Amino acid sequence: MSERQIQIIVPARASEKEIFAAQELAEFLRLASGINAGLIREDEPGAIGAEGFFVGATRRAEELIGLKALLNRVGEDGYKIVCDGKNCIVCGGAGQGTIFGVYGVLEHMFSLKIYTDDVCTYENKSPDFSAFEKENIPDFPMRAIGIYPVHLERRSPGIGNKRYCYRMRLRQMDEGWGINNHSYFRVLPPAVYKEAHPDWYDESGTMLCLTNEEMTAQYVENMKKIIEDTPEDSLYMFGMEDTTVHCHCSKCRALAEKYGGQDVAVMLVFTNKLVKALNEWLKDKHPERKVWFFTFAYLWAEVPPVTKDENGNYKLLYEDLRPADNLGVLLAPLRSNASYPMNDPRNIETLNTCYHSGPRMPVKEIFEGWRAVVNRICVWSYNQNFYDYIAPCPMWTGLDENYRWFKQLNAYHVFMEAGCVGTFGNFSEMKIYCVSRLMWDCSLKLEDLVKEFMGVYYKGAEKEVYEYFEYIHKHAEWMDKNLDRQMIFVHFDDDPNGRILDARFWPIEMLEKAIDIFDRALEKDLSFNVKKRVLLESVPVKFTLLFLHRDKLPSARVKKMIAELTDIAEMCGVTYIWDDKPNTIQEVLKTWESELSAVKAD
């Protein structure tokens, strides 16, 4: 090892994120090279003549890189690394750029690969400061994943694992947003306003009446306070509530009819009024603020008010609906599916509570129609059955193609929701890894990422785990072809195939073969951690076998499987499994155990 004393130097007034970046560097430097580098601020006496790593917006970074020009190029999460033979200077954007830059340094010097919060690989050697320069900018400026435990929100501190989130080069879901998601009622809470102003809400009380002028004026005033209270944020969401309900009062219906019966027009008229009033206020009171507003393209407000001209180009049906220059849309195709890439014409978005009937439109047309009329889009995609979380979930088809398409559309913020409620298998950790990599660099191939992850995370059992992964996706193709059942995300009111946990979709022979694959994997000489991971991935098919077919199995085997699942759930932290009651695996397994005891007693 080098006798040279290596230091980690941070700015005199280092931010919390710069300190975190320096600590991450120190930890992996110690693991890979055995060096215990000291951390000093550049205004401390020990920093004079110090050599090593300069992390963040240091004076050295300003001298060698030029911070203002750099930040203009790389945005909030991009970074630049410069090694000059003696030192390594890393600096990034004001978001997590410097943190992600540190991981870039570690990847360059030690071939560091981080797969989960506690699984990584690296080479053991001394740091190499040989001349090197790299600038790295993510394909999407803002990236977040709604999978436990990397799902974080600033307004819900204490939930999730921030270190894991950053190690995956992700953001907290609401980072940069003064207000986000379903936000109508956060701006105008019914508990505060509804009693005095019942006409501000629809008759069910679950949505705003978007044509009420008094409500609109109060909404603007409340938004002014939110914007002033969040000076570091630049994105603000006017988000409809998470419901298919919208107001049907005479004014709302008349406005929709004015625009050909399109409900989305009511939302756009309301939203444009908000943006116009707030832009005028910002210009007068806060001219320095550069703010973007967003609204949902979701459920009843999903279809853009556009048509195609003779050349196949999208154009607005009504020019007075044109969104303001700084109004974008957050596209959330909840009623699409994961059986095809999103830009595949077969991926149909249903526009109400039905699946096999009612309006149907290709997701591709919805996205491209909106993109033609707004200057910025964000994407909220889905990758989980949000009724039966515990069900097998082969939803990996075309994931990499989706992100390449999102990039073509110049998406600004990409978020995938795929199970924020807890641990239940279905390759959650692998999904976090693969999707986070694709969000940073969508040119990567999903199959390569999957095999790379499995080779490390399921080491010794990767062959069998990949066999199961392929097997369950081939089964999903069979379901699509023979049963017209796509991998949808929600339950549809009129769909006879609505629930994914149905014996038609999961024949006993198919589940038994899947379990046999896991049994072969578990017969191998595996480390404790790998065995635990394989057991967790076996939970969906084992639980599904009992849920659908336990009456066909010998009672002794059912009893044994209940005990096994109980042990795995305790060891791996599996609890919440679906929206039914009871909703924990522990309660369900106890119910089945009681059934067995009752049968025996009879």
Image (cartoon, rainbow, N blue to C red):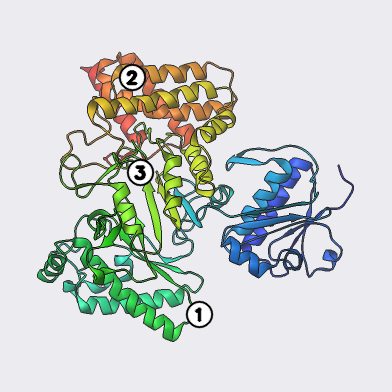
Give the residue at the far right of this rendering: 3
204 relative position to 21: left or right: left
Asked whether residue 84 is in view, the answer is yes
Residue 415: image location, x then y, percent: 43, 52
Mark nearer the N terminus (2 vs 1) = 1
Q: Name the residue beneath numbered marker 2.
A: 510
Compared to residue 472, the image places residue 401 above or below, namely: below
Q: Secondary structure at mark 3?
A: loop
Tell how many labels.
3
Q: Name the residue beneath numbered marker 1.
A: 288
Q: Secondary structure at mark 2?
A: helix
Q: Quadrant of residue 355?
A: top left
Compared to residue 117, the image places residue 101 above or below, namely: below
* Separation (CA) of disc 1 from disc 3: 38 Å
Residue 342, disc: 3
Q: Quadrant of the C terminus?
A: top left
Of marks 1 and 3, the one in the foreground: 3
Residue 402: image location, x then y, percent: 41, 44
Q: Quadrant of residue 502?
A: top left
Q: Quadrant of the N terminus?
A: top right
Give the residue at the far left of this rendering: 250
